[in-house]
Every structure is written in structure tokens, then in C-alpha cells.
Amino acid sequence: MTALLHVDGVGKRFGGFVALEAIELEVQNGERLGLIGPNGSGKSTLVNCICGTLRNETGSVRFDGQALDGLSAHERTRRGLARSFQLPRPFGSLSLADNLRIPILYAVNARGGAGAIGGEAIAARCRDLLGEVGLAGKADRLPRDLTQIEMRKLELARAMAAEPKLLIADEVMAGLSHNEVDEIIALLIRLNEQGVTVIMIEHIMRAVMEVSQRLAVLVAGRKIADGPPKDVVRDPEVVRAYLGE
């Protein structure tokens, strides 16, 4: 596998607070990476720097062989980098299908070339995506009509509508039941098997261990471990970070 994402020495401060310190991270094409760490460890800050919501003061981010530094979030999405949010952010006044139509129009079609699709093909793509996440038959419903897990599935479908090469799933399982977590695990693995590289940020460790082929651990803005999941969770520094001295 070749590196799809390369984070080189990324640092981020908020005033005098160091949120990220010289983070080095590579994600291989086709890989499933788990990004874990205690609350406040810098996971979301790192994702925001990768996705363009925040600008890192030091270091650089390369994606698919190209530098992302200076690009806005929507420009990075058009390059093939998409994310879901821990708190779903659908367009509340739009139907589920229209929520998917927007990233198709403004991410997929905005790239131009052979990937652009027309009206009927967009409608079919929206139906396919909703079916893929288990929301078939709800294309005309509004987000307010959905259950919590359905909202998470819609959030993933919205990210997938942009046809990403890399999907960053940010705590998509928080607050879900055991069976609902299993549904999301199966969905993420299925998306990966279809060719999408996945970074999963999650606190539910059984999900982390089942999905991840590799784990990276952040603590207090530093990466303290990176490797096979079974080795990482036994690392003494990782154990101290989660359980204390």
C-alpha cells in the first residue's frame, strides 16, 4: 500500500496552549486507522487541521500526493477527503435525498471531468446511498423524522455522497446501543472494502479493535503510540494515559 495521507510535523496552538505538537502520521491507501486518545488529547484538532477547518501553524498535510496547505475545507473535500461529524449537521429543512444531492453537486460535479453526473443519475445515486446505509424508502423524509442511529447513518451517507478517497468518521457510534454499534461497524468495514480509506475516531474500544488495522494514540497533543492494535493497547504509556498511574 502507498500513503494516501501524510501529516508531517503538524503543530497547532490556541494562544499559549499547545493543542498539537509535531504530529507525524501516515495513512496508507485502503487502510482502516483508529485514532484514539483521552478527551482533550487533540484528536478533533488534528482532524480539523487535516480537513481544513483549522489552519496548523507548523508542519504540512499532503493528500494523494498533493499539498493541502492553504486550501479551504470545501477544496479539500473536492480532492477526495470527507468527514462525518460527532454531532450530525444535516440541512434540517431539506429531505434526506436533497441532503445527499448537495455534496454530489458541490463536491463530485464541481470536480468536473467524467465523474460529473446529471439529474436522473443524481437521483439514482441518492437512492443507492440511502439504501446502502439502511435508509431506503425515507428519501423524502426530513432529518427530524429520524432516530439517533438513522441520523448517524445519514451523516455517513452525506460524507460518502462526496465520493471520498478518505473518510474520517468522528465518533459516529457515541450514544448508540450494542446492536446499533454493530451496524455502524459493519457499514464502515463495507465502505472500506469498496475502496474507501477510513480513519475512525472512537471511544468504544470494542469497535476500535474490530474495525482498526492500525492504531495511533494522541495524548496531550502528542502522538505516543502507532502500530498494531493488540500491541498499542498493551503499551505502558497508553495504559497510563487511559487508566492513570
Image (cartoon, rainbow, N blue to C red):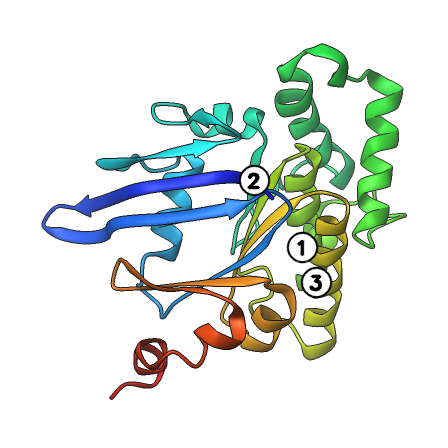
Q: CA distance from mark 3 to mark 1?
A: 12 Å
For label 1, the SS is helix
Which residue lies at the image location 38% right of the left edge and 67% below the top edge?
37
Q: Nearer the viewer, residue 152 or 67?
A: 67
Q: Which residue is mark 1?
A: 151
Amino acid found under the numbered disc labelled 3: Ile
Q: In the rendering, at what x and y percent does residue 216 appear?
A: 43, 61
Q: In the rendering, at what x and y percent does residue 180 appear?
A: 72, 70
Q: In the rendering, at what x and y percent does residue 35 appear?
A: 46, 60
Label 1 environment density (alpha carbons within 10 Å; few <14, some 14–19, many ≥20): many
N-terminal of the pair, mark 3 or mark 1, is 1
Quarter of the picture holding the C terminus? bottom left
Q: Nearer the viewer, residue 196 or 52?
A: 196
Q: Which residue is mark 2?
A: 2
N-terminal of the pair, mark 3 or mark 2, is 2
Q: Compared with residue 201, is residue 182 higher up or lower down, i.e. above or below? A: below
Quarter of the picture holding the N terminus? top right
Q: CA distance from mark 3 to mark 2?
A: 27 Å
Q: Compared with residue 240, is residue 212 higher up or lower down, i.e. above or below? A: above
Q: Which residue is mark 3?
A: 184
